[in-house]
Image: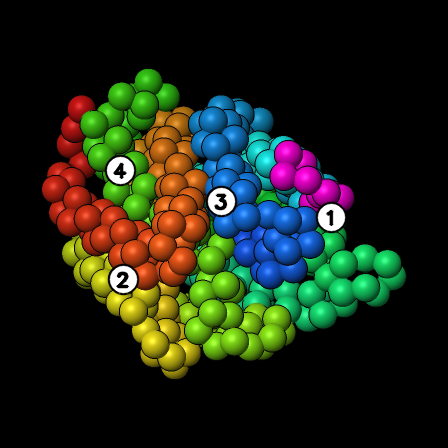
Amino acid sequence: MVATTAAAVAKARRRLIPFLFVLYVVSYLDRINVGFAALQMNAALGFSNVTYSLGAGIFFLSYTLLEIPSNVILARVGARRWIARIMITWGLVSAGMMFVRSATAFYVLRFLLGAAEAGFFPGIIYCLTRWFPTRDRARAIASFMTAVVIAGIIGGPLSGALLSLDGFGGLAGWQWLFVVEGLPAVVLGFVVLRMLPEEPSQARWLTPQEQFALTTQLAEEASLGTSVHSIHGALTSGRMWLLAAVYFTIPVELYAMSFWLPQIVKAASGAGDFYVGVLSAIPYAAAAVGMIVIGRHSDATGERRWHIALSAAVGGVSLALAGFAHNVVAALVLLSLAMLGLASMLGPFWAFATSFLGGIGAAAGIALVNSVGNIGGFVGPNIVGYVREATRGFAAGLVIVGAMLVAGGALVLTVNPSKKPFV
């Protein structure tokens, strides 16, 4: 039975992770491309640092408001149909950003983009809990979430190239960026309807014995190894709220870096838009390595909290120091360490958080942690934007954001690792 389960997990890893990875690459590109668009859009439309920060971050307000109901609906109607719906609607809204002409339109479309995408990431994490046993989960989640850093590697040069189309076909470069990077989500939404099985019993690429072994293993874990199985239990669990507070600090730094990285690199290097895109890919490349290594080590040792805390310390301290770098080489080294530490937290964190959840409680609990945490996606870019407006520099804002991540790493050490109920 053990060997059969391992074979089923290996097949699921080969079949599901690459596909889900592609979906998340497209998702993350559509979130962060506004950071590259800002290199042209802000000047063309007369947006201030504060206007841009508010518009970039407002995505997370609608995302947070709708994330829990979206994930509960996903658990009821199935991941395949609901993820397809999410992708098609967000792709259309993202491409529609090309029509922005005012701050109001910018705010409205960013808000609608968050509403359209709400539930995508927690829905995928919930989907992975229905395929991968706890002992294999950090590696699976880290492999899936390398899409964040690969999107940064791809997105920098791609966005820089699209910006260079400025004036082609009567469109500005930032308009080409939105439409070219938005429409693939629509196409992939229809692909999801054909390619994503809901659970092992529906996977034709598993043998009947593998379907049974994996389903049995997951059912045993759901009945014996978790403490929260209901929506009410997830939403009232003290542990889940504490984990949400920890996770809040991750999007604070992640999106502060993602939305402002091109402008930080441009200020440090003075390079043109295309080369800024290329240089901006370097921190993401470094992060991809750390993410996989730390995720595998966390699974191999079974330890989660210290992997999260130490990664947070590296990420937070490096980002704070990056604000004081005086040349592009030093800035890129520190930004790379910051992104590496930050990204390395993700696999162990979600493996730890999902180990306490089961059934419909998993959908609600994952959405709770992610929705509360993603308020940080609004806070982080705005901290940097407002502080930069006041100080005419990035240093103070990066110190604040880095300190928050270090605090999150310290906070996770207070979370009870026992799977007994904690309310």
Rounded to the nearest angstrom, the CA distance separating label 4 from label 1 is 35 Å
Amino acid type assigned to the residue bearing label 4 in the image: Ala
Residue 198, x across and y down, in percent: 55, 39
Residue displayed at 22% across by 35% down: 242
Residue type, label 1 = Met
| Distance CA(mark 1)–CA(mark 3) | 21 Å
Tell me the quarter of the image containing the C terminus: top left
Q: Which of marks 1 and 3 is nearer the N terminus?
A: 3
Residue 226 is drawn in which quadrant?
top left
* Mark-to-mark CA distance, 2 and 1: 34 Å
Q: Residue furthest right?
A: 169
Model colouring: rainbow
Q: Nearer the viewer, residue 254 or 229?
A: 254
First in residue order: circle 4 vs circle 1: 1
In this rendering, the label closer to the viewer, 2 or 4: 2
Place of residue 365 in the rendered image (x, y in percent of width and height, measured from the top left):
35, 31
Q: Residue 50 carries which label?
A: 3
Q: Pick whichever of labels 2 and 1 is earlier in the sequence.
A: 1
> Which numbered dot is residue 98?
1
Q: Which image quadrant is residue 339 in?
A: bottom left
Which residue is drawn at the image coordinates 38% and 60% (left, top)?
393
